[in-house]
Image (cartoon, rainbow, N blue to C red):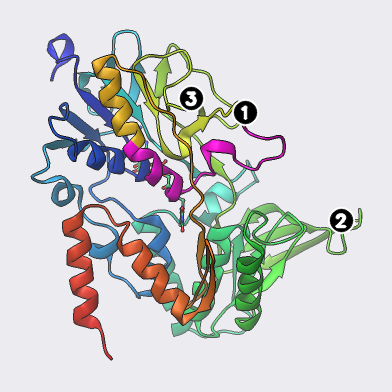
Amino acid sequence: MQGDTAPAQNVVIVGGGFGGLYTALALAERRQHPPVLLIEPNDRFVFLPLLYELLSGELRSWEIAPRYDSLLAGRGLAWLQDRVDRIDAEKQQLHTRAGRTLAFGRLVIATGAESSTFAVPGADRHSLGFRTLADVERIQSLIADLKRHRLPLQRIAVVGAGPTGVELACKLADMADGSAVIELIEQGPQLLPQARAFNREQASLALQRRDVRLRTRTQVASVEAGAITLHGHPDGDAAIHSETLAVRAVLWTAGLGFRPPRIDPAPACDGRGRLLCGADLLLHGHRHLFAAGDLAAQVDPQAAPGEAFGAAGPSTAQVAFQQAPVLASNLIRSLRGEPLEPFRWRDLGEMLSLGIGEASLTTAGLTLAGPAAYQLRRLAYLSRLPGRSHQLRVAAGWLADWKP
Ligand SMILES: Cc1cc2nc3c(=O)[nH]c(=O)nc-3n(C[C@H](O)[C@H](O)[C@H](O)COP(=O)(O)OP(=O)(O)OC[C@H]3O[C@@H](n4cnc5c(N)ncnc54)[C@H](O)[C@@H]3O)c2cc1C
């Protein structure tokens, strides 16, 4: 597959997250699929919606972070452990960090998002993220340390009361078991602004039961080693209230940034740096480049004014998961010169992890909270884990652990 000699009928997928891996798996299910190469620098896929349960020890790393070599084995899919630095759209070639030049017939760019600290002074340097297996290990050792040396007024600040911040705050409070106060900082007027009312209420109750201190209308002004400075408008008035809190750690969950590989010529992007694409997920102005997952900014000309997401959907695993079969189909159609089909997101509902053994969910016709919701959420995600054989291995593990 080196240089100009590569076949022009292959598919290369850049990024093995929800958008990339599930598209590769969907292609593998098609009879006589084209050669597929997945390029991903990490050796394990991470099923991010269950990262909280890995943190708390409710699930094990092999369950939520299977290795790519075992996921792709025997499916006719190739994996290259490397990072793509540059894409030449005209020559249909890409260049990797390890110095390879590879040709592609069709390319999927699914490099996802990374956390953004909005240039808040000190935030990059002094806060932890919550996205990788290394982040989980760092937070687990922090909690172990807090519990070993129980000192008065130990604090952890979680920045951002979106789903990740709220779910993380609940798990942390349970894990810390009274050894630390959890402060949840939100610049907007309420937690979970885009959530269903039922889930928002359940989340609010879960935070209160765990004594998590929610500070809304509060911005992070700076982060230093051991301290966070906040500017708040606690009563919604214009006067700024400034406060510096001593903290053991700051966990940053607010905001997403996008840093795809360099693409020549530069493609059209939205104001957040996501790649503009049509309903068929083809990049604007390109015939061979597709986007998937968080990075794909699908323009929906039919979106009603004020409609939150239109056909494209929000930046979630649920959307990337739904894009995968449509994109697989479009890649094959595109190689055959056939018309492409549009992707339309179907809102299947929303689930939140709310502490150890608890969750809240809202789907069509069902709202549920507490331990039953926790079990349902686990089952729903079991059926979303990548690949049938991995799902069966995990299900067998859960059955073996089951105590009636
Ligand atoms: C903690 C957490 C919990 C979440 N919970 C939920 C949830 O409950 N429900 C839900 O629907 N969504 C959830 N999400 C959001 C969801 O995980 C994302 O929307 C989803 O992962 C997007 O898929 P993606 O393929 O765009 O990106 P990702 O899954 O992030 O994958 C991108 C991949 O690209 C790779 N990559 C990056 N740059 C390069 C490069 N230059 N070359 C090659 N590879 C590269 C990365 O290593 C990564 O593996 C959660 C996110 C987080 C962080």
Mark 3 vs 2, N-terminal side:
2
Which residue is found at the position 19% from the left and 59% from the top? Answer: 390
Q: Residue furthest left?
A: 74
Q: Nearer the viewer, residue 175 or 79?
A: 79
The image position of residue 71, as x and y in percent, is 18, 50
User: Compared to 152, does 23 lie above or below?
Assistant: above
Mark 3 vs 1, N-terminal side:
1
Comparing labels 2 and 1, the label whose residue is closer to the camera: 1
Q: Amino acid at mark 2?
A: Ile
* Residue 84 appears anywhere in the view: no
Instruction: Tell me the SS state at disc 1.
Output: loop
Q: Which residue is mark 1?
A: 271
* Residue 14 appears anywhere in the view: yes
User: Compared to 96, does 156 lie above or below?
Assistant: below
Quadrant for residue 23, please give it: top left
The image position of residue 239, as x and y in percent, is 91, 56
| Disc number for residue 240 | 2
Q: Which residues are magenta?
A: 303-325
Which residue is found at the position 66% from the left and 60% from the top? Answer: 228
Q: Nearer the viewer, residue 124 or 36?
A: 36
Instruction: Tell me the SS state at disc 2.
Output: loop
The image position of residue 108, as x and y in percent, is 33, 28
Mark 1: few/some/many CA within 10 Å (<14, 14-19, 20+): few
339 inside magenta stretch: no
Comparing labels 3 and 1, the label whose residue is closer to the camera: 3
Q: Amino acid at mark 3?
A: Cys
Q: CA distance from mark 2 to mark 1?
A: 29 Å
